[in-house]
Every structure is written in structure tokens, then in C-alpha cells.
């Protein structure tokens, strides 16, 4: 193989640059040229390639975001869009592609592979819902960011004897709310996977006050229904005997930015190296690089994109026992 390309697609996460750097330098090490695709699948369809050199990827290991830019592409979901992308790849002399993406982007990658183009996927998402891998690039940094923010909120919550609703990302998956609930010592974690009534939340706040806690921290996943806003209204408007003042914080996109943690830098680097080596020896074509236990491995894209990863039962049980 003489020339490969790398693309980052979907929502950004910390660690993308570390992966781009590893892909570039590994490919160059094996005598293969590397093109970066700008603006995700949008740039692939429009033929926006840039040559990546060893010096060009210097100093990006600890940078958040992606030097290539990224996008959520509606066009790539169409056959016409993917056919156009194929034409661009062939015109640029690209023989294989590394797709660094989450659920949606890897499903798109699988479709491109089915149309005959050799590629390998690398999982990234802060939501940790990518099936087939224990963890994806970005999860660890996002959790560290949340832990830092919740620590700060807890300080002020305790000083004022307040309850806080803290919303974290996860449209369809409660992993970040659940895991941060556990590592931050929250009183409750509200997640899409487990229903909880407004009354139950109020009861948790009442109980925290009754047993003498100086605060009550409730982690709320973005996708929890009926949602943080409805809950806040309920807690503020009903004549509830919870005695705590309630405040809300939405952590939002700060969870997606910042310098990647040591774990994410290493994971992104290992996955980038494995992606290129497995493209070059053929073993990774049509597959996704995964971490299982302490080892990197390869999983068929067909399997990795067939469903989303459920929450680990062990964490659910742990939160049930300890988040109260
Ligand atoms: O899928 C990753 C994610 O960060 C979700 O947790 C969140 O709901 C979504 O992306 C936000 O997307 P956007 O940045 O496009 O608003």
C-alpha cells in the first residue's frame, strides 16, 4: 500500500489528534504516504485532502479537538454521497482509509466498505456506547472533566446547603451520568436506561436533608426523560418539603474539549498504530480496532455497528448501592 487517508467524523472528543499523529507516523514508518481528510465525511465528498507529514503532526498529541476538522454529514448517509466520496478517494490515489468515528460514522464506514473500499474503523465517543470495545477514545477525558466540575459544584453546594441537578452528555446513553455519579459520590444518577419519577427525585433530596447531608448532587443524563428542565420546574414549583434550594448546571460541550488524559493519549496512540498495521497486513480491513481488557483487537464492523453497547450491569448495581 502506497497511500492511505485518515478522517475524523462526528462529534469531536479529546484524543483525536493523538490518533491522527499515530496513524501518520506509523504509516510513514512503513513507507506509506498519508492524506488527512478535512471536515469529516463532508470533506471526503468534496475531496478536501491535505498531506500529513511527520513534522506536520508535531505538537498535537496533547491538543483537544481535531486538526482535520469534523462534521456530521447528511450527504454521506445517501448512496450518491458515498459514491462521490469513493470517486474522490480514487482520484487522490488513496488505497485505504482510517475512519475515526462513533456509532453513526462507523455505520457509514461499513457502508463504504460494502461498496468495495478497504478501510478500518477506530472508535471515539465520550458516550462510551460503541459496541465491541470496552472503551472508546474520549471517554476517560470527559469523565475526568466531569469529575473536576462536580468537585467544584460540590464545594459551593455544601457551603450553601443546596441540591444541584448536573446535566451531562449522553442523548441515548447514560454512561457518563452513571459513572460520574459513582466517582463523584452523587446522591442519584438519572439515566435513560432506568426510569425514575419526579417524586422519587424529590424524595432523594428530602432524605439527604433528613439524614444531615449538607448537599444533594443529582447527575442527569441529557437523554433522561422527562428531562432536567421538567424536573427543575417540578422541584421549584411544587410545595415540596425538601428544604434544600435547588440549582442546575449543564456541563455541555466542555465535556468534549480540553487536553486528552494520559489514558486517552495512550489509547488513541495504540489504536492508531493498530489501525495502520492492520490495514497494511490486511487483517483490519472491514474491521474496527477495539480494546478488550488490556489488549487491542479487531472486531468486524458488521458486528460493531449492529447495536449500541448496553450499560455494564456491574456499574448499575454499584450505583444502586452507593449513589444515595
Ligand atoms: O454523541 C456524542 C455527543 O457528545 C452526545 O453525548 C451529545 O448528545 C451530542 O454528541 C451533541 O452533539 P452536537 O455537538 O452535535 O450538539
Image: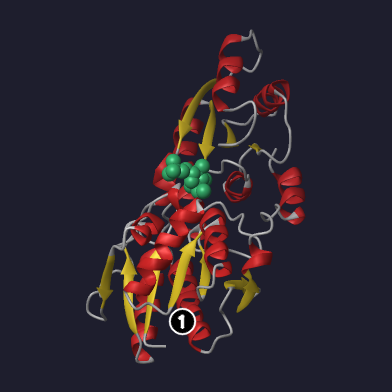
Left or right placement of residue 61 versus residue 309 in this view: left
Residue 142, percent across and down? 48, 53
Residue 194, percent across and down? 73, 38
Residue 136, percent across and down? 55, 63
Mark yes or no: residue 270 visible. Answer: yes
Mark yes or no: residue 133 visible. Answer: no
> Quarter of the image holding residue 7?
bottom left
Name the residue nearer the viewer: 271 or 263. 271
Q: Residue furthest top?
A: 239
Above or below — where is 320 with respect to 257? above
Q: Quadrant of the C terminus?
A: top right
Name the residue nearer the viewer: 244 or 302. 302
Whether the residue under disc 1 has CB within 8 Å of ligand 1: no
Residue 251, percent across and down? 45, 39
Name the residue nearer the viewer: 7 or 323. 7
Circle 1 packing at 10 Å, graded few (<14), some (14-19), many (20+), is: many
Write the residue at 44% across / 55% down: 81
Left or right placement of residue 160 versus residue 38 in this view: right
Write the residue at 57% across / 40% down: 171
Number of dots carrying numbers: 1
Q: Which residue is mark 1?
A: 276
Amino acid at each position: 500500500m502506497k497511500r492511505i487517508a485518515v478522517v475524523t467524523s462526528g462529534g469531536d472528543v479529546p484524543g483525536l489528534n493523538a490518533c491522527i499523529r499515530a496513524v501518520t507516523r506509523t504509516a510513514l514508518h512503513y513507507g506509506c504516504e498519508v492524506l488527512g481528510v478535512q471536515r469529516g465525511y463532508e470533506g471526503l465528498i468534496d475531496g478536501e485532502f491535505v498531506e500529513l507529514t511527520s513534522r506536520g503532526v508535531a505538537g498535537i498529541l496533547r491538543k483537544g479537538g481535531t486538526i482535520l476538522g469534523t462534521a456530521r454529514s447528511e450527504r454521506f448517509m445517501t448512496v450518491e454521497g458515498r459514491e462521490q466520496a469513493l470517486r474522490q478517494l480514487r482520484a487522490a490515489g488513496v488505497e485505504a482509509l482510517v475512519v475515526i468515528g462513533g456509532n453513526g460514522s462507523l455505520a457509514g464506514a461499513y457502508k463504504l466498505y460494502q461498496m468495495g473500499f478497504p478501510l478500518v474503523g477506530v472508535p471515539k465517543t465520550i458516550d462510551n456506547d460503541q459496541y465491541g470495545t470496552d472503551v472508546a477514545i474520549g471517554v476517560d477525558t470527559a469523565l475526568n472533566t466531569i469529575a473536576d466540575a462536580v468537585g467544584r459544584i460540590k464545594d459551593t453546594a455544601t457551603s450553601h446547603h443546596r441540591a444541584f441537578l448536573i446535566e451531562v452528555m449522553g442523548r441515548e446513553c447514560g454512561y457518563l451520568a452513571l459513572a460520574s455519579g459513582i466517582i463523584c459520590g452523587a446522591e442519584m444518577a438519572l439515566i435513560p436506561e432506568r426510569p425514575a419519577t419526579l417524586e422519587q427525585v424529590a424524595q432523594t433530596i428530602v432524605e439527604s436533608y433528613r439524614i444531615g447531608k449538607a448537599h444533594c448532587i443529582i447527575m442527569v443524563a441529557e437523554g433522561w426523560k422527562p428531562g432536567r428542565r421538567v424536573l427543575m420546574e417540578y422541584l421549584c414549583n411544587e410545595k415540596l418539603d425538601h428544604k434544600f434550594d435547588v440549582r442546575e448546571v449543564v456541563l455541555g460541550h466542555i465535556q468534549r474539549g480540553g487536553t486528552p488524559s494520559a489514558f486517552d493519549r495512550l489509547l488513541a496512540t495504540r489504536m492508531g498504530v493498530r489501525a495502520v498495521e492492520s490495514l497494511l497486513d490486511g487483517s483490519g480491513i472491514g474491521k474496527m480496532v477495539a480494546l478488550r481488557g488490556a489488549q487491542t483487537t479487531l472486531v468486524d464492523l458488521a458486528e460493531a455497528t449492529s447495536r449500541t453497547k448496553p450499560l455494564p450491569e456491574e456499574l448499575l448495581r454499584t450505583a444502586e448501592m452507593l449513589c444515595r
